[in-house]
Amino acid sequence: MQWATLQSGAFPELELLYAIPNGGHRNKATAGKLKAEGVKSGVPDLHLPIARGGYHSLYVEMKKPPEGGKGRLSPTQIWWRDRLIDEGHAVVTCHGATAGIEAIRVYLVTPEGIENGQRVLPGHYAGSGAPRRRSVAVKNSIGATTA
């Protein structure tokens, strides 16, 4: 989020980027209050409500880098991803802050380069904003292997 604040001069749209407080561990009282207010499990972490390239907006699920088998989507997160894609939103799962920054930049500059529903690892997109194919096979967030 600090990156978005610093880059809002170049990309004024980033002023609309916001975090969705649906993760983390909370005590029962706080969790109950948030649930009553409408917080839902599985909703992606970030939302950029800017239409680009035929998408209504961009949702970003942030995960830790995938070393050690961590960073997979839960069944609830997969459900949300699929529903949001069905409704015309771009949704990416980004492994680390660098991947998140790259995906947001690509969405703003060349949204046709977004690989909707895919995992994004650091270096996935070239600096120009065009998509760059990885030379090794990687499992996407639904378990399918992509090249």
Image: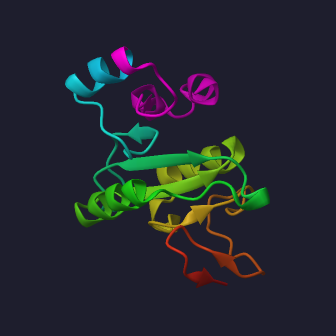
Say how many tags the image has.
0
Inspect the magenta stretch and tell me whether residue 4 lies in it.
yes
Give the image's coloring scheme: rainbow
Closest to the observer, 147 or 15: 147
Task: Name the residue at 78% across, 81% down.
Answer: 135
Q: Which residues are magenta?
A: 1-29
Write down the quadrant of residue 66 in the picture: bottom right
**Above-or-below relation of 91 to 23:** below
Closest to the observer, 131 or 115: 115
Q: Please indicate whether residue 3 sits to the left or right of residue 49 in the image.
A: right
Task: Name the residue at 60% across, 52% down.
Answer: 94
Closest to the observer, 50 or 32: 32
Write down the quadrant of residue 22 in the picture: top left
Quarter of the image where the N terminus is located? top right
Q: Percent position (x, y) of residue 78? A: 40, 61
**Above-or-below relation of 58 to 144:** above
**Above-or-below relation of 55 to 143:** above
Closest to the observer, 41 or 20: 41
Quarter of the image where the C terminus is located? bottom right
**Above-or-below relation of 107 to 48:** below
Write down the quadrant of residue 37 in the picture: top left
> What is the residue that sits farthest to the front in this orientation?
28
Q: Percent position (x, y) of residue 142? A: 49, 72
Task: Name the residue at 36% across, 41% down.
Answer: 41
Task: Name the residue at 57% across, 22% down.
Answer: 5
